[in-house]
């Protein structure tokens, strides 16, 4: 468990250590973003050494996108990768790079790239061989394409390549739905407990008085006295 937490912490520290954020991004045409990695990272078909790279959208369709990666200056091609749309609930003001968990000692594998201010990002599609490994290590579904697509990567062929989704159980299923980033958990609202009922009183409150009872008792005695006197008085003789 400790090793897993260390790997996750390392993954999120790879991007932007020099800039103090996920990425040092410069906005340009076609979502062009300049990103600095402090350590080597993996993209489909390629390991990128630590350094600065330019990510740019080459083409996009309804269900697949092509991402080109250039050197720092944005002129020399480094890699071309296939991606599918990934979604998040809330956009951020900075570039966000998500990583797949990998085996110990391997460079972190980029899972998705989110451009600033957008809720739709790019989930990278790996070769089937690598997707099986990533799915098993991360316990997540990984989109995949035939290994030959990255042996000779070309944007035109990627647009029509057959996609599958590799599950953590190492099975391949059709890509029918796009996974959405899980929403942040809503804090539970504690229910206000109902007030406890007041205990039944066994005596009169201190503000009450026994005067009423005394008065009634006194009236009863007076009435009784009149009755006794009436019957005790001598009756007149005839």
Image (cartoon, rainbow, N blue to C red):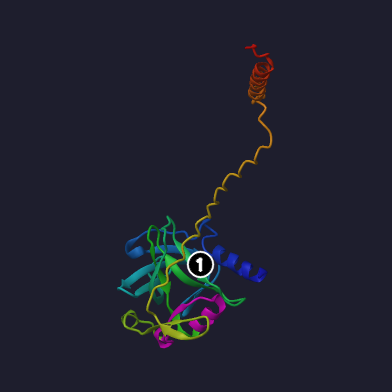
Residue density around tag 1, few if under 14, some if 14–19, many if 20 or more, within 10 Å: some
- On screen, residue 159 versus residue 229, left or right, reads left
Q: Describe the element under mark 1 as helix, strand or loop.
A: strand
Looking at this view, is 2 or 108 the one in front?
2
The C terminus, quarter of image: top right
Q: Is residue 14 magenta?
A: no
Q: Position of residue 224 (x, y in %)?
A: 66, 21
Give, as a single range, the part of the protein colored magenta: 131-151
Q: Position of residue 216 (x, y in %)?
A: 63, 23
Quarter residue 179 falls in: bottom left
Q: Is residue 186 above or below residue 136?
A: above
Q: Is residue 160 above or below residue 193?
A: below
Question: Going 55% across and 60% down the picture, which residue do you hit?
Answer: 17
Asked whether residue 38 appears in the rendered view, the answer is no
Question: Going 68% across and 37% down the picture, which residue do you hit?
Answer: 202
Looking at this view, is 62 or 26 the one in front?
62
Q: Position of residue 162 (x, y in %)?
A: 36, 85
The N terminus, quarter of image: bottom right
Outermost residue, front side: 238
Q: Which residue is mark 1?
A: 51
Asked whether residue 123 appears in the rendered view, the answer is yes
Q: Is residue 148 magenta?
A: yes
Q: Position of residue 218 (x, y in %)?
A: 67, 20
């Amino acid at each position: 468990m400790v090793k897993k937490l260390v790997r996750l912490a390392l993954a999120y520290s790879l991007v932007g250590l020099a800039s103090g954020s996920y990425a040092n991004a410069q906005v340009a045409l076609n979502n062009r973003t300049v990103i600095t990695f402090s350590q080597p990272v993996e993209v489909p078909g390629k390991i990128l050494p630590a350094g600065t790279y330019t990510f740019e959208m080459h083409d996009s369709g309804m269900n697949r996108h092509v991402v080109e990666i250039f050197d720092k200056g944005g002129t020399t091609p480094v890699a071309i990768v296939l991606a599918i749309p990934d979604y998040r609930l809330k956009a951020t003001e900075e570039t966000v790079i998500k990583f797949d968990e990998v085996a110990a000692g391997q460079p972190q594998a980029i899972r998705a790239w989110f451009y600033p201010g957008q809720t739709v990002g790019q989930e990278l599609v790996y070769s089937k061989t690598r997707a099986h490994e990533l799915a098993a290590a991360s316990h997540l579904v990984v989109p995949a394409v035939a290994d030959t697509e990255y042996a000779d990567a070309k944007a035109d062929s990627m647009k029509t390549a057959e996609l599958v989704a590799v599950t953590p159980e190492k099975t391949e299923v059709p890509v029918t739905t796009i996974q959405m980033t899980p929403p942040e958990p809503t804090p539970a609202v504690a229910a206000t407990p109902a007030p406890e009922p007041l205990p039944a009183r066994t005596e009169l409150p201190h503000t009450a008085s026994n005067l009423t009872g005394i008065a009634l008792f006194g009236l009863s005695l007076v009435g009784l006295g009149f009755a006794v006197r009436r019957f005790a008085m001598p009756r007149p003789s005839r």
